[in-house]
């Protein structure tokens, strides 16, 4: 794959502000929106928001290589496609900080071993729980699998609905965005791409 997305762990991380500073920022946003952060219903909102953010953006503190480091080699020579589809996720658009929700489908050809199936779902969550674009997230999942597993090929498809498109702007509810990426066998053999897509779409 030509495009290489640098993982966040290799980037220079800005210093994280204190919880008190984060809560003050939320209070400022409430004021900017036109409401009173001191009224009863909003008094604890800054605390709740910062707590929620620590959960929905927990992916910044996780490393995909750790999630994928254990490979099972006793698979009786299995070397055909492994596919995990319909992995639900919720992420947040880095442009508007509103959610996008969808499913990820991951296929790969093993190269001497396989990874636990739940680990693929964990990798999706790890990247989803960051400020994201769907295109970047697709590449990040591919790159993580390539680095950790050295497979003979990876296929990733993500389909999602973006709230920044359905609740603001053009306000088109139900519109779905689809991204995909292929490496190795999937990239070089169109028949394997078709097989992956057929298996993803199959009931």
Image: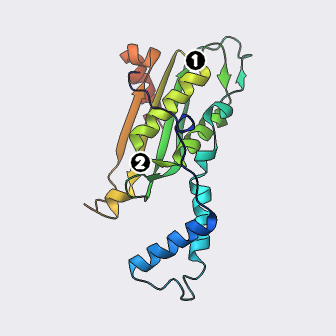
Nearer to me, 174 or 28: 28
Q: Can residue 82 be seen in this view?
A: no
- Left or right: where 166 falls relative to 196: left
Report the residue at 42% width, 51% height from top: 94
CA separation in Å, label 2 and label 1: 28 Å
- Kindly identify which residue carries mark 2: 160
Q: Can residue 107 be seen in this view?
A: yes
Between disc 2 and disc 1, the foreground one is 1
- Kindly identify which residue carries mark 1: 150
Name the quarter where the N terminus is drawn: top left
Q: What element carries label 2?
A: strand
Quadrant for residue 127, please give it: top right
Quadrant for residue 84, please give it: top right
Q: Is mark 1 on a helix, strand or loop?
A: loop
Nearer to me, 8 or 194: 8
Residue furthest to the top: 77
Report the residue at 58% width, 54% height from top: 16
Q: In this view, does 164 lie above or below 46?
A: above
Report the residue at 53% width, 39% height from top: 8
Crowd rating for badge 1 (residues with CA inside 10 Å; few <14, some 14–19, many 20+): some
The picture places residue 65, in percent across and down from the top left corner, at 63, 30
The earlier-in-sequence mark between 2 and 1 is 1
- Left or right: where 44 falls relative to 93: right
Quadrant for residue 159, please give it: top left
């Amino acid at each position: 794959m030509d495009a290489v997305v640098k993982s966040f762990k290799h980037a220079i991380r800005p210093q994280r502000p204190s919880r008190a500073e984060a809560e003050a920022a939320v209070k400022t946003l409430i004021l900017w929106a036109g409401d009173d952060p001191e009224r009863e219903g909003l008094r604890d909102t800054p605390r709740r928001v910062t707590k929620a953010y620590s959960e929905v953006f927990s992916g910044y503190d996780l490393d995909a290589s750790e999630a994928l480091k254990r490979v099972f080699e006793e698979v009786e020579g299995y070397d055909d496609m492994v596919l995990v589809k319909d992995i639900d996720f919720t992420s947040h658009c880095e442009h508007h900080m509103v959610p996008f929700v969808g499913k990820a489908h991951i296929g790969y050809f093993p190269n001497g071993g396989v990874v636990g199936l739940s680990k693929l779902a964990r990798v999706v969550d790890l990247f989803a729980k960051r400020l994201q674009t769907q295109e970047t997230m697709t590449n990040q999942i591919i790159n993580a699998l390539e680095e950790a597993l050295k497979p003979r090929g990876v296929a990733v498809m993500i389909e999602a609905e973006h709230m920044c498109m359905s609740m603001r702007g053009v306000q088109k509810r139900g519109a779905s965005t689809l991204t995909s990426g292929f490496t190795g066998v999937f990239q070089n053999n169109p028949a394997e791409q078709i097989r992956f897509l057929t298996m993803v779409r199959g009931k």
